Image (cartoon, rainbow, N blue to C red):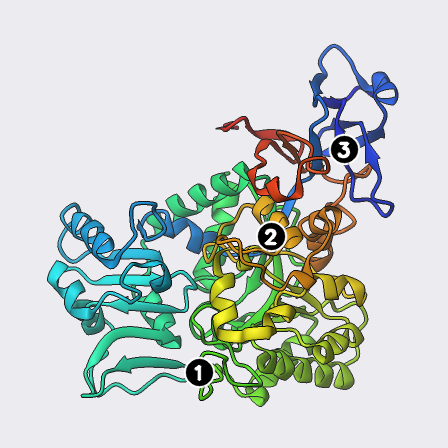
Amino acid sequence: MKADIVFINGEVITVDPKNSIAEALAVKGNRISAVGTNQEMKVFIGEETNVIDLQGKSLLPGFIDSHIHLILYGVNQLAVSCKAEHIESVKDLLIDLKKKASTIPTGQWIRAWGFNETAMKEKRYPTIAELDAISTDHPIMVTRTCSHICVVNSRALELARIDESSENPKGGIIEKDKEGKITGKLIETANMIMADMASYSESELLKAVKIASEHFIATGITSIHEAGAYGPESFRLMQQAIKSKDIRVRIYAMVGSLNNSHEFVNKMVSSGIVTGTGDERFKIGPAKLFTDGSSTGPTIYTREPYSSDPGYSGILYYKEEEIYQVLGQAHKKGYQITVHAQGDRAIEMYLNCVEKALNETPRKDHRHRIEHAGISAPDLQQRMKDLGIVPIPNPPFPYEFGDIYIEHYGNRVNRMYAARDYIDNGILAAGGSDAPVTDHDPLLGIHVAVNRRSRSGMKIGTVQSISVMEAIKLYTWNGAFASFEEDVKGSIEVGKLADLVVLNDSILKVDPQNIKDLKVESTILNGEILYHRETLVEI
């Protein structure tokens, strides 16, 4: 049978059980039909076959981002970007916000994302007075890069019915100054409540997910594990966008939301729509809760106080019994379960819940997960192994945030996003970017997993550095395993889905310090070339 596409003269990194490197492969329909040598592929070449000469470039399985926020990433592209190169100060940001205010109708939200006070010349957040000076007719929301903290103006607070008499929501802080006046800064669940208030219209959301899908495909991502946004509406929207081909990446959707995630999880569990429901384009993933905050906030829940503040150990969303009440029930009903857990104390609490759930209702091959698993001490890693947990670390985090980690956590950076330890201890982990928190490009994630240096060049827990092949596996086969899909994707083997990515050079031969400078030349999803040399291909 003749192939539709044959790749020859390549560095075909199969990520099969032997980590084999081939030079050619054939694709028929949406499946890989042969892998081997150039000579072996000749029999599959016919008059209609598209023969692609890779000229020694790397061809890999399509990248799988095991923790990313497609909807949040997309809507951020509609807002003011605080990560834009020209924004170096709060003053620069205020100028952009003022420009935005002049272009939209009165009353519409002005949103900014990616703010990082440590990157600003003033080393501070904008004040409520500064935001009010831009507009009190428009609600304004400036969201920190971690997506766990925001600063808003008076109009936004008014819409959310937050004033000086408002009490802190559970797991959150409405910041007030010494005189009891609201500063406009909202932390953790208080931020999540405001994010719900500032939600987008359906037409904006549909535009946003299309943008996100296109951006992901351009970096070689063919599958994502969607980590949650706006609850049930997110699920409906994503499924409709997949049918209309506005979303073209494959989705494994976590059952969780940024606000009141316990309510959403309970509703989904009660409905009987269990993990694995769906098809190769969209599947229901694990039930997910938040347990603590952001590693850069910093608001993660730690055993020992922060190095930067001996009197502070972070923020906890739920008590251990409350976590178990929701996720223990989900486990009993057959769900894969997971939590956002960054600090070692938050991780420990969740592991206690998993252990209790498995003792009460034993289940083989559950593949329960931990999203982020930020500070993973050796005793916690041993428990992960014993319980069969799949941690989802974030390889690119040290690049953008590593200097902050050293400030807040000191020597604990040696156990943050512990890829080396996981491999050495026989714990299977999968990589996720957590975009839009940081860059979604898997090549950056692979680069940082190998080099463990921050953007400034500082070493960030280099004891956790791994090899290039090990890093590739984090973003391919391991991601497929984390979603129970290793039989159909994650490696280049006969019969698997033809989800592939071609780079512009050899990732195994380039200097490891230059991996982040590699580019995606082509992205193939379901046997179709969707992206080629900086151009998206319309279907």
Nearer-N-terminus badge (1/3):
3
Circles 2 and 3, Cβ within 8 Å, touching? The answer is no
Front tag of 1 and 3: 1
User: Residue tagged by mark 3?
Assistant: 12
Marks 1/3 in contact by CB < 8 Å: the verdict is no
Please, what secondary structure does the residue beneath circle 3 have? strand
Say few, some or many: other residues with alpha carbon within 10 Å of mark 1 (under 14 / 14 to 19 / 20 or more). Answer: few
Location of mark 2 (residue): 448
Q: Nearer the viewer, residue 296 or 325?
A: 296
* Image coords of residue 175 (percent x, y): 29, 80
Residue at the (13%, 54%) spot, across then down: 106
Percent from the top left, x then y, of residue 255? 55, 66
Residue type at mark 2 is: Val
Assign the N terminus to one quadrant of the image: top right
> How far from the left and from the top, in percent, is residue 2?
80, 19
Cβ–Cβ under 8 Å for marks 1 and 2: no
Q: Which residue is mark 1?
A: 309
Where residue 391 is drawn, which disc sits there? none
Question: Mark 2 Cα within 10 Å, few/some/many (few <14, many 20+)?
Answer: many
Compare marks 2 and 3 and give the one earlier in the sequence: 3
Dot in front, 2 or 3: 2
Q: Is residue 396 visible?
A: yes
Give the residue type that dot 1 points to.
Answer: Asp
Left or right, 472 with respect to 144, comes to right
Residue 7 location (% of width, % of height): 74, 24
Asked whether residue 271 appears in the rendered view, the answer is no
The residue tagged with tag 2: helix, strand or loop?
Answer: helix
Alpha-carbon distance for marks 2 and 3? Answer: 22 Å
What is the tally of numbered marks visible in this picture?
Answer: 3
